Amino acid sequence: MSVPPAASGQTSPGAPEDRATPVSSGGATPILETRDLKVYFPVKRGLIIQRTVGVVKAVDGVDIQIMPGETLGLVGESGSGKTTLGRAILRLSDASGGSIRYEGEDVLALRGREMRRLKQKIAMVFQDPYGSLNPRMTVGNIVAEPMLVHKIFDDRSKIRDRVMELFDTVGLNRSMATRYPHEFSGGQRQRIGIARALASGPSLLICDEPVSALDVSIQAQIISLFDRLKVEQKLTYLFIAHDLSVVRHVSDTVAVMYLGKVVEQGDADAIYRDPQHPYTQALLSAVPIPDPEVEGKRARVVLKGDMPSPLNPPKGCVFNTRCPIAEDQCFVDIPLPRTFHDGRQIACHVVSRGIDSGSIAAPDARINGRPLESREGRVAAGDGPPRESPFGLLGTEPSSQRDKPIISRGRLAMLVGVVLLGVWIAMYLGNFGLGAEKEHSIVPSAVIESRIDEFIDGFDCIREDAVVQLDLSNASYARVLYLKDNPSKPGSYLPPRVEYRYHYAEGTIEAIPEVTDFCY
Ligand SMILES: Nc1ncnc2c1ncn2[C@@H]1O[C@H](COP(=O)(O)OP(=O)(O)OP(=O)(O)O)[C@@H](O)[C@H]1O
Ligand code: SF4
Ligand SMILES: [Mg+2]
C-alpha cells in the first residue's frame, strides 16, 4: 500500500515546500525530557502467594521533550497512558525503564532532599476539582499546605500573605480563604487547585485534563487563566487533554499517544494542519472546523472497534487492529519513530516509506530543531529492540518461567498451616489481653518502606515533616508512620508497618503528633 492520501490541499510533511516552522529552541536544554520511558504495571494473581501473570504496558518507550516556556499537548484516547506518563514524571508511578531528565538532572536517580526539591519545581493540576481537595481543610489551608511542606517561609504571616496573593492570581476573592471546598463551584475549585499547584513556585505544571470536568464557559475561563499564568509566571506546561480543540489552543507542540506509545509528535500547527499518522488523522478528523464549507468537504475517518488492552497489545504496530492502511509488515514489526524534514516524528511503516533515508532519526537528528536520540541508535548501542510480549504475558521473563508457581504445592500447604496456627495463637493471646496493641490498620511493609525512602534525609533519618509530605496531593488524610523498636537489635527499628489515618482539623498541620526524630 502507498503513503496515505493527504487531505485536499495537504502535502507530505517531508516535502520541502511544506516544512513547518520549527519551534524556536536555539539549541537550549529542554526543561523536561523522557527517553524510552516505560511504566509497566504487573498483574498479580493468587490469594496468599501472589505471582505475576501479566503486565500492563501503560507507557511503553516514550520520548518527549518540552522546552522552557512551551506547552506540550498530550492527546490520545482513554487508556492510552497519558496520566501514567504525567505521574511517572512526578515519580508518583514507578518507571520500569528509560530516563526522565528535568533541567538535565536524572529524575529517576533523585532521593530524599533532592526529590523534595524536584517536587517543589514540578506541580500537578488534577482533572477532578471535587476529589482533589481535602474536604476537611479550609481552602486557605489547602493553598498554604505546599508552602508548609516545602518550608518556603518560616513566618506564618508571610504564608498568609502569599495565600492571599495566590487567591488574587487565580481570580478568587480573598474572603473565601476561610471557606471549605464544598462551598465552591467546579470552576472555583479548579482555581483553588491551580493556586495550590502554584504555591510551591513550580516551573513546570503537569495539567491532567484540567478542564474536562467543567462546563464549556468555565473551561474557557480556566484556559485563559492558564494562558495568563504561562506568561506572568513563566510556566511550562505538559497539558493532557481529550479535547483536541483545547489542546490546539494551548499547545506549541503536540504528542499523540496510542496504547502506551507516542505515534506522532511535533509542531502543533503542522500536526493540526497536516496530520500524517493514520491514528492522528482519525483523531483530528473528529475535531469540528468552524467553517461550514471546509467542514462539509472534510472526510471523517471513523475507527472501527476499541483500543486493545495494554495487557494484551497487538504484535507489531499497536494500531494494526484498527488501522485502515495496515500492511503485512505492520503485524510483525514495531514501527520506530522517524523524523521528517519538518522535525516531526512519526512511527508508521507506511508513512515513513515516503521519507528518504536521510531523514530517518539519526543520533544528531532534531525534533523541532532540538536533538533527539533515535530509537535505532539505542538499539545499535546495545539496548536491544523493544520486546513484545504475546498476549499480555510477562514480556520480561522467558516464557518457560512465566507460569511457573513461585512455591510448590507442598510448601504452600505448610505455609497455610503455619499462618493458621499463627492466627489461632494471636486470637488466643488476645482473649487474655496479651499481645500487641490494637492498630488501626496494617499495610504491607513494602508499601510504606518504598514511600518512606523518599523522606529519609542525608543523615538516614526520617525528617520530622515526613508525615506531612506523604500523599498530600490528592488525599483527605495524612499517613502517620510509626517505627517499632527492633527487640533483637537495640537502637534499630523494625520496618515501618502501621498506618494511622489522621484527619486534619483546620490549621493543625503541626499538630500531627509524635513523629519526630526517627533515625535508623
Ligand atoms: N496502577 C495501575 N495498575 C494497573 N494498571 C494501571 C494502573 N494505572 C493505570 N493503569 C492502566 O494503564 C493504562 C493507561 O492508563 P492511564 O490512566 O494512564 O490512561 P489515560 O490515557 O490517562 O486515560 P484517560 O484519558 O481515561 O484518563 C490503562 O489501561 C489503565 O488501566
Ligand atoms: S505501522 Fe501502524 S499505523 Fe502505520 S500503517 Fe501499519 S498499522 Fe497503520
Ligand atoms: Mg488520564
Image (cartoon, rainbow, N blue to C red):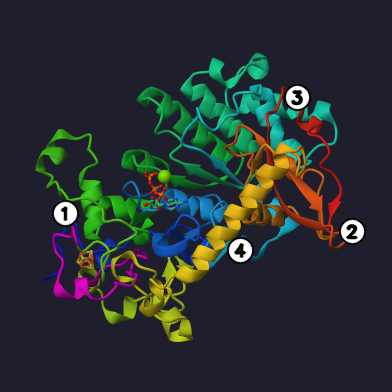
Q: Nearer the viewer, mark 1 or mark 4?
A: 4
* Residue 492, image quadrant: bottom right
Q: Earlier in the sequence, mark 1 or mark 3?
A: 1
Instruction: Reply above or below: 364 against 93.
Output: below
Query: Which residue has dot 4 on it?
Result: 108
Q: Give SS at disc 2.
A: loop
Q: Earlier in the sequence, mark 1 or mark 4?
A: 1
Coordinates of residue 146 in the picture (x, y in percent): 69, 38
Instruction: Reply above or below: 108 against 387.
Output: above
Q: Looking at numbered disc 2 in the image, what kind of residue is underneath it?
A: Gly
Q: Which residue is located at x 45 percent, y 66 percent?
A: 369
In magenta, the rendered stretch is 321-349
Instruction: Reply above or below: 289 against 420.
Output: above
Coordinates of residue 248 in the picture (x, y in percent): 36, 44
Q: Looking at numbered disc 1 in the image, what kind of residue is underneath it?
A: Gly
Q: Give SS at disc 4.
A: helix
Residue 491 badge = 2
Nearer to us in this view, 215 or 363? 215
Q: Which residue is located at x 38 percent, y 43 percent?
A: 247
Tell whether label 4 touches label 1 (CB within 8 Å): no
Nearer to us in this view, 149 or 280? 149
Query: Real-space Cα distance between discs 1 and 4?
Result: 45 Å
Magenta stretch encompasses residue 326: yes
Instruction: Reply above or below: 194 against 95.
Output: above
Query: Which residue has dot 1 on it?
Result: 9
Query: Real-space Cα distance between discs 1 and 2?
Result: 75 Å
Q: Give SS at disc 1.
A: loop
Is residue 369 left or right of 507 when viewed as pictured?
left
Coordinates of residue 51 in the picture (x, y in percent): 46, 64
Query: Real-space Cα distance between discs 3 and 2?
Result: 35 Å
Quadrant showing the C terminus: bottom right
